[in-house]
Image: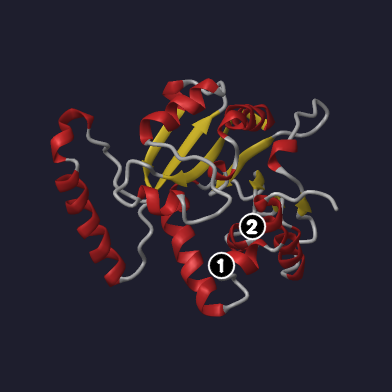
């Protein structure tokens, strides 16, 4: 009998095991779209024909959101056969099953204007993270950019989200995230990092206000070393020179 790691088993039926809602449910779809609208809208390309790749696209929520926003040149892949099947069920037949670590540079292939790597970096072995981001940089057109979201270990809830998923391998702070991107070849001055505020309801905004205060109180003793970003996730954008 062939050996299957815990992660391999998890990815086979990822959606079932983590019980993540999909946009097939209308209420979940509304909340997910509101989430994307708030965190990603300022960083969406103006050109609706821009070539966009969603790396580790999951159940296709971001692809569906982008399609509804009018973007017409979309690609995506995911390691989980179950996730890919959900994408196909939603009509995204172009989504392929692929491990992100198999992403290779093809000198004949057209480059991408934007690559999204949302909630994927933490699933990779730390030793492979820089190479993965380097491959992404090589897949970008000059002036293109990657948008990355990953758990924030500088948040008071960092450990919770770091270990909330069995396939999470490591976490980053706002400082180590920039270091990783520069190791991968992105120029430090071409890297932006900001909080991933994602509330869309009154109660959610109250929770965000509470988190801001809690973060300041807990890290008061750190002084100048206090992390600036309190959100559970970091949101980054890095441009290809």
In the rendering, at what x and y percent does residue 121 appear?
A: 55, 41
Q: Where 4 sits versus 192, above or below?
A: below
In the rendering, at what x and y percent does residue 27 appear?
A: 50, 78
Q: Depth check: 85 or 163 in front? A: 163
SS for dot 1: loop
Can residue 110 be seen here? The reply is yes
Say the numbered circle drawn on residue 50: none
Work out which residue is located at the far bottom of the displayed protein and give it. 26
Say the numbered circle drawn on residue 20: 1
Q: Which of marks 2 and 1 is in front?
A: 1
Q: Where 17 sits versus 11, above or below?
A: below
SS for dot 2: loop
Residue at 73% x, 44% y: name it: 99
Residue at 56% x, 35% y: name it: 145
Gap in angstroms between the C-alphas marked 2 and 1: 10 Å
Left/right of residue 221 with respect to residue 188 in the rendered view = left
Work out which residue is located at the far front of the displayed protein and give it. 1
Pointers 2 and 1 in contact (CB under 8 A)?
Answer: yes
In the rendering, at what x and y percent does residue 160 appear?
A: 39, 54
What residue is pinned by disc 2?
A: 58
Q: Where 95 sits versus 181, above or below?
A: below
Q: Depth check: 41 or 169 in front? A: 169
Q: Depth check: 133 or 91 in front? A: 133
Work out which residue is located at the far right of the displayed protein and give it. 1
């Amino acid at each position: 009998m062939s050996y299957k790691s815990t992660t391999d088993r998890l990815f086979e039926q990822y959606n079932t095991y983590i019980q993540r809602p999909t946009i097939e449910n209308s209420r979940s779809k509304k909340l997910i779209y509101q989430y994307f609208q708030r965190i990603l809208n300022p960083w969406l390309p103006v050109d609706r024909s821009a070539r966009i790749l969603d790396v580790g696209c999951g159940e296709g929520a971001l692809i569906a959101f982008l399609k509804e926003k009018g973007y017409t040149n979309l690609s995506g892949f995911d390691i989980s056969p179950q996730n890919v099947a959900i994408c196909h069920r939603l009509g995204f037949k172009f989504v392929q099953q692929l491990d992100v670590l198999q992403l290779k540079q093809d000198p004949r292939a057209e480059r991408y204007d934007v690559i999204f790597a949302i909630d994927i970096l933490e699933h990779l072995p730390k030793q492979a993270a820089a190479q993965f981001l380097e491959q992404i940089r090589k897949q970008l057109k000059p002036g293109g950019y990657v948008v990355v979201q990953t758990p924030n270990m500088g948040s008071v809830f960092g450990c919770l989200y770091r270990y909330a998923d069995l396939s999470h391998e490591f976490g980053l702070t706002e400082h180590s995230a920039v270091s990783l991107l520069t190791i991968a070849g992105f120029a430090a001055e071409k890297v932006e990092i900001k909080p991933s505020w994602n509330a869309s309801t009154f109660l959610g905004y109250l929770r965000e206000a509470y988190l801001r205060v809690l973060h300041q109180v807990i890290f008061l003793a750190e002084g100048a070393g206090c992390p600036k970003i309190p959100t559970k996730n970091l949101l980054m954008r890095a441009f290809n020179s």
